[in-house]
Amino acid sequence: MTDIKLKILTEEDFLFLAKKNPEGIYDEETRENLDRIIKRLIRGKEFCTSDEKQLLKKFQDVIFGILLRKDTETKGKINHPGIVQVAGNFSGDLAAESVIIEKTATVLANIAAEEVLCKGKVRGDIRATNKVKITKEAEVTGDIHSPNLNIEKGALFEGRCSMPKNRTPQPIFLMKKTPKKTG
């Protein structure tokens, strides 16, 4: 690395953060490291070099997406104001701005989001304020409630679907808890 001036961060931490995307989706360990580095910059803000201030400006108010890695099992409730990408197994309740279920994923949960992209297996109800897309490799067992639904040829869907008239999408991630199935 060339002429980087640092007072708060180590070169290793600076480079780790500098290589990340503020809109990126990261696993828990990576998010914890990113948060630790950003908090360190915020605490030492008045002593930061211009390089550190520039990095802080880029990352100060970011909300990193959550990645549940392939070959992992996660149970519980997730209520996240950004993107949640599931590549492993998840059971519980899931609410986020956007949810991506990868081909390798199995989700046993009710999902609430603005947008849902399903490429894997879902057993549970999906409520989306904007749209749901189910790709040809996906298997969905549960009811879907969304104003916009796209099911590719070859996808498996077993359940009911309700498609309310398109209305202004609401930010679902602000909800206190995952909505329960109605009707």
Image (spheres, rainbow, N blue to C red):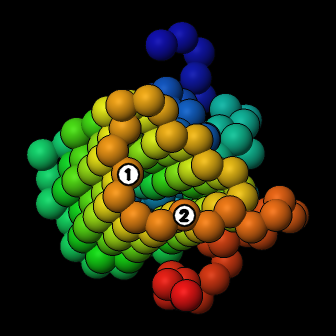
Of residues 29 and 137, which is closer to you in this image?
A: 137
Q: Is the C terminus in the top left, top right, bottom left or bottom right quadrant?
A: bottom right
Q: Residue at 36%, 31% (x, y): give it.
A: 154
Q: Is residue 38 visible?
A: yes
Residue topped by disc 1: 157
Residue 163 appears at what percent x and percent y? 68, 63
Of residues 101 and 82, which is closer to you in this image?
A: 101
Q: Residue at 59%, 15% (x, y): give it.
A: 3
Residue 81 appears at what percent x and percent y? 60, 65
Residue 173 as seen in the image, left or right of residue 13: right
Q: CA distance from mark 1 to mark 2?
A: 10 Å
Q: Residues within 10 Å of mark 1 (few under 14, many from 20)?
A: some
Residue 97 as seen in the image, left or right of residue 79: right
Q: Residues within 10 Å of mark 2 (few under 14, many from 20)?
A: some
Residue 149 appears at what percent x and percent y? 61, 49
**Amino acid type, residue under disc 2 in the picture:** Cys
Please tell me the numbered disc located at residue 101: none
Q: Is residue 87 visible?
A: no
Residue 73 as seen in the image, left or right of residue 109: left
Residue 113 appears at what percent x and percent y? 58, 63
Tags 1 and 2 in contact by the CB under 8 Å rule? yes
Q: Secondary structure at mark 2?
A: strand
Q: Residue at 58%, 23% (x, y): give it.
A: 4
Please tell me the numbered disc located at residue 161: 2
Q: Residue at 67%, 32% (x, y): give it.
A: 51
Q: Secondary structure at mark 1?
A: strand
